Image (cartoon, rainbow, N blue to C red):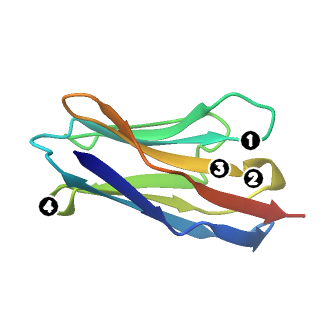
Amino acid sequence: QVQLVESGGGLVQAGGSLRLSCAASGSIFSINVMGWYRQAPGKQRELVAAITSGGGTSYADSVKGRFTISRDNAKNSVYLQMNSLKPEDTAVYFCTIIARAQYWGQGTQVTVSS
């Protein structure tokens, strides 16, 4: 069984920063892609950023230049550094990995006040 545990969410003022962390554990043999999605109230879940096993990254247009995704393969962990946060970044952020299947974390709330 695979578990993803997220941490680092919270309340921050606009312009501030937060760093999300996600650690995967369990029967993981090889993780291909790690990423972060977010879901705001009344909206669909959307991809924020993803990183491949080789280090290739992709970002939603709305976060380019402000967010940075990174991973530590030895720790089966993925991180999301979020700078210059805006109120529209407020959402529940979900960690995900693609290994033999896709797995999801429980989500962590990020709230950006104006």
- Look at the picture and state if 111 lies above or below 61: below
Looking at the picture, how far across and down is residue 3, in whole percent?
31, 51
Q: Gap between marks 3 and 2, in whole Å?
A: 7 Å
Q: What label sits on residue 74 in the rendered view?
A: 4
Q: Which residue is mark 3?
A: 92
Looking at the picture, how far across and down is residue 75, in whole percent?
20, 63
What residue lies at 74% left-to-right and 72% top-to-bottom?
Answer: 12
Q: Earlier in the sequence, mark 2 or mark 4?
A: 4
Amino acid type, mark 1:
Ala
> Is there CB contact under 8 Å for labels 1 and 2?
yes
Amino acid type, mark 2:
Thr
Under circle 2, the secondary element is loop
Mark toward the viewer: 3 or 2? 3
> Is there CB contact under 8 Å for labels 4 and 3?
no
Q: Residues within 10 Å of mark 3 (few under 14, many from 20)?
A: some
Q: Gap between marks 2 and 4, in whole Å?
A: 30 Å
Q: What label sits on residue 40 in the rendered view?
A: 1
Q: Earlier in the sequence, mark 3 or mark 1?
A: 1
- Is residue 16 in view from this perspective? no
Amino acid type, mark 4:
Ala
Under circle 3, the secondary element is strand
- Image quadrant holding the N terminus, namely top left
In the image: residue 104, left or right of residue 43: left
Q: Which residue is mark 2?
A: 90
Task: Name the quadrant containing residue 53.
Answer: top left
Q: Earlier in the sequence, mark 1 or mark 2?
A: 1
> Is there CB contact under 8 Å for labels 3 and 1?
yes
Looking at the picture, how far across and down is residue 42, in whole percent?
81, 33
Mark toward the viewer: 4 or 1? 1
